[in-house]
Amino acid sequence: MAENKPTYYITTPIYYPSGKLHIGNSYTTVACDAEARFRRMSGYDVFFLTGTDEHGLKIEQKAEKLGLDPQTYVDQMAAGIKELWKKLEITNDKFIRTTDDYHEAAVQKIFQQLLDQGDIYKGEYVGWYSVDDEEYFTESQLAEVYRDDQGQVIGGKAPSGHEVELVKEESYFFKMSKYADWLMDYYQAHPDFIQPSSRMNEMINNFLKPGLEDLAVTRTSFNWGVKVPNDPKHVVYVWIDALSNYITALGYGSDDDSLYQKYWPADVHMVGKEIVRFHTIYWPIMLHALGLPLPKHIIGHGWLTMKDGKMSKSKGNVIYPETLIERYGLDATRYYLLRAMPFGNDGIFSPEDFVDKVNYDLANDLGNLLNRTVAMVNKYQGGQLVATNDATTDFDADLKATFEEVLANYRTLMADTHFADALAEVWKFVSRANKYIDETEPWVLAKDESQAAVLSDVMTNLAKSLRVIAALIQPVMPNAPREILNQLGLAETTLTLNDLSFDDFPATAQVVAKGTPIFPRLDVPAEVKFIKSQMTANTKQKGRKAMEEAKQQAQEVESTGKKAIRIDAFDKVELKVAQIKAVDHVEGADKLLKFQLDDGTAEGRQILSGIAQWYPQPEALVGKKVVIVANLKPRKMRGELSQGMLLSAEHDGKVELVTLPDTDVMVPGAGVE
């Protein structure tokens, strides 16, 4: 009969394939992999899910810019992410893509059910939207706002720093407000639902208490996504499409939902802190509305940042995991990622800290413990380990007691995904084993034949220590444990954690190999310089790409003899008709005129233009219809806000505004194509 193991289901967020993943992005997957390995070694039947979120406007725009159809683009990006996970030796059981047919079909069923039961309704959305974040924001959520002279908000920045734009479109809405009280009650009844607890406080204070608004869950301004059944001009937006992956990957909504029946609800959704709101507010409400159980825990970890702030390609402070793996090995890379991130808080990456952790933790502490033990067994015992237990030292009991304490703490910390703290516990025992060498002084025992049994037991205790250390680090470092066991002559040993015992050691003699250091010590200045050079190289690569684009544009200029731009650049310019309502000189600025314009919106707009010398009687322009660039970022000039640009013609040193005829077509707000 098959063993009846407890199940454990853990997920990463599904990654948005808009660019190459750096070590900050990779942390979540390495962390989930460590937890999955720990659970398997502890006797669980584990299902570990990761994947890619492949729909949306940003993907559509990325693909178009590269001259690719969206499916080809996401196919290439998903292949690259899978290759990265292979290099990091991620042991996921499934990789879901939101372009998978079964997922899209299940999303349509979920949407239709929510629509049929009245949880989704059609309306019109008006609000601030960030393309880069694929996220809507209320005015109060914006990190920065731009206002006109009347104090009306005309633009701004999302908390991420990305620009937002005002979106008005027909949309389907999910009745989030209907479930706000239920969610608050659920939080109170399940205080460990969101971890760390500070994240729950953020959700309550920032979103639930101010009042939960209904959520727009479709878009009509792009096509790349799952179409709404019976209303295909609407695309199901990320909230339903992406979040549903956690159940569709298990077969929910398909003919075979056996995996769903076995593994749901998830034990852990692990996500970065920037997407906690979606997973702890939208997702629980969706599941509750569908009548489904909620995940047991949602963990919102911090960011792996740089000294100068968040890791960002635009800042040129990015380091990629492939760089570290190729230079320092997989185990050093994975160890650093999990040791550098305190639970719930941000970690800070620096080349100096990375090199120090490799040198001190891995080379000096663990590597040196293995090297000294192997060397002494070969020197004093002819390479033979024998578990006699005929003699003991005064220090044996403390060594074993330290291990038992570390093991208990380690199990608790790993079960709670406190990886940095769990590794700190392991290194307490590594340090204790190194101290044991200094206490027992094998080099002294070797000089006294009457102490041969004691020496043998000391060597065996060191081997036992290394064996249990290998077990404890195996969820984090896949390769070092195997090498440790090989050097100790324990290559056939299977490591587990549910019944790990210090004294579970072969009674027969083990032949210890003369191994090489598994973590060679690094030259600090040289390696710090190397890592910094790789970060600089990433910046230069970005710069080279920009230069190549500029060069291509310059070639187009040369071939046409004109100031050419690419069509994708022109498409970003929004030209509109506006009518001049008033115009005045700007105080203290001889060249500037201040135009008040009717641009078809209720609030209108103000634009400053340096054309005063050509219009000595600017009031004569009132009533004229002009062309404006409507989507320029507002800026201040002489203390006045300018919200765009007026089109004008220049010839023989003279400038004249481009004016339009007064027709039924040329109305304020009309687009200029």
Image (tube, rainbow, N blue to C red):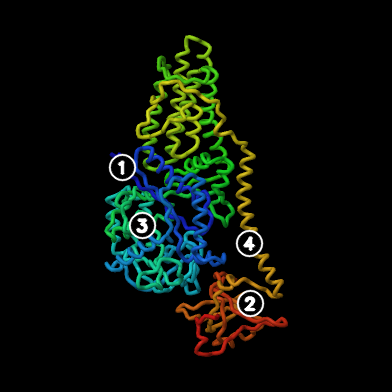
Question: Marks 4 and 2: in contact by CB < 8 Å?
Answer: no
Residue 349 falls left or right of residue 506: right
| Amino acid at the residue labelled 4 | Ala
Q: Residue at x 31, y 51 (%)?
A: 265
Q: Earlier in the sequence, mark 3 or mark 4?
A: 3
Q: Nearer the viewer, mark 2 or mark 1?
A: 1
- Using the rendered image of the protein, determine whether residue 34 is visible from the camera's viewpoint: yes
Residue 638 falls left or right of residue 173: right
Q: Secondary structure at mark 3?
A: helix
Q: Give how far across and how far down residue 56 sits, in percent.
A: 46, 65
Question: Marks 1 and 3: in contact by CB < 8 Å?
Answer: no
Q: Nearer the viewer, mark 3 or mark 2?
A: 3
Residue on which the image places disc 2:
610
Q: Give how far across and how far down residue 193 sits, in percent.
A: 33, 50
Q: Secondary structure at mark 1?
A: loop
Question: Marks 1 and 4: in contact by CB < 8 Å?
Answer: no
Residue on which the image places disc 4:
546
Residue on which the image places disc 1:
6
Q: Residue at x 39, y 74 (%)?
A: 170
Residue on which the image places disc 3:
248
| Amino acid at the residue labelled 1 | Pro
**Which circle marks residue 607 in the picture?**
none
Quarter of the picture holding the N terminus: top left
